[in-house]
Image (cartoon, rainbow, N blue to C red):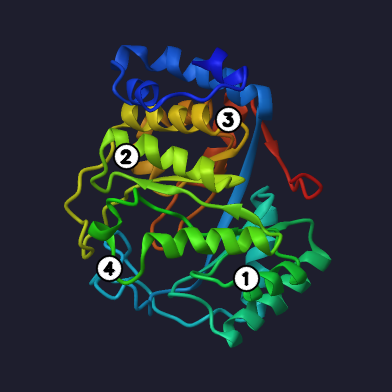
Amino acid sequence: MADKVLNGEILSIEEGVTVLQADDDEVLPIMQAAFRVRKQYYGKKVKLNMIINAKSGLCPEDCGYCSQSTVSSAPVEKYTLLDKETLLAGAKEAMNRKAGTYCIVASGRGPTDGELEQVIDAVKEITSTMPLKICACLGILNQDKAKRLKEAGVHRYNHNINTHKDNHGNITSSHAYDQRVQTVEDVKGAGLSPCSGVIIGMGETDVQIVEMAYALRDIDADSIPVNFLHAIPGTPLENYSRTKPMKSLKVLALMRFINPTKEIRVSGGREVNLRTLQPLALYAANSIFVGDYLTTKGQEVIDDHHIIEDLGFEIEENALAEA
């Protein structure tokens, strides 16, 4: 499979499923094959990203996995968009953590004009004073608002497809799968780098996981965050089982095989799903978040730095000039 991918061929659905359903004894050869592809395009570099939860709770959407949604009873902080000083302080912390990308994430269906201007004001100051890339994740967006973010200095916009199109209705009813895809297309049309990924463990089949990987290939997302469901008490998916560590590794290898040239980021839920196998994930993925997520805790930043160092990998620090 690695040979095929490196020769520019595309795996079939059936081949993708064999990766996910391989015996656990085959995981190390699978990860080695994924590493061959990863190394071809990214060497041993690991990109670090940091999230700031710029607006928490107060969301009218009914996404079943999310502790900030209107259907969640999880005890999360609720606040409106953070002021510029707080966003600037977050950017400085991203630098301290050796992150190259600072992700400004806000709950809600999409940004109001006022919220957009607040983000734009902060982004202009951050990009004029720090060598950070900015990724914004503010919900559903039209091309006009995307262009305004681009002009302000935002490099990338995240809007995940989250799940398979046929499973989307089981996860949320307040917006359509096609609206998510359209937002990614509008982002691309505005000249922003598109970021779109998935949440594994929300009832999708193995065939659907493979098709999700192909959907992201079709979207041509530059960055693909692979989240693993962290089932939060108080959300509709609170009783869903975690994805086992070995299966999580197979998913990451699959994503690398199907999207060989793209940034594959191990994202939310890696600590509780991969557990002690987190280091092996970097043989397929070339990017991680450092620190906490939106409403869940991550592991200590120094532990992530040690993982990278102990593997003989290298942090891609503040690589502003690289796309």
Number of other residues with Cα within 10 Å of mark 1, as a class: few under 14, some 14 to 19, many 20 or more = some
Gap between marks 3 and 1 measured at Cα: 28 Å
| Residue occupying image coordinates x 75% and y 66% | 153
| Whole-percent x, y for residue 123 in the image | 71, 71
Tell me the element at label 2.
Answer: helix
Residues marked 2 and 4 touching at CB (< 8 Å): no
Q: Using the image as rendered, state which of residue 142 and residue 156 is in the foreground.
A: 142
Residue topped by disc 4: 173
Q: Using the image as rendered, state which of residue 13 and residue 226 is in the foreground.
A: 13
Disc sitting over residue 143 in the figure: 1
Gap between marks 2 and 3 measured at Cα: 19 Å
| Residue occupying image coordinates x 44% and y 17% | 30
- Compared across the picture, whether 155 is left or right of 172 comes to right
| Whole-percent x, y for residue 28 in the image | 42, 15
> Mark 2 against mark 3, which lies toward the viewer?
2
Disc sitting over residue 208 in the figure: 2
| Whole-percent x, y for residue 309 in the image | 62, 29
* Three-letter residue code for mark 2: Gln
Residue topped by disc 3: 260
| Residue occupying image coordinates x 23% and y 46% | 203
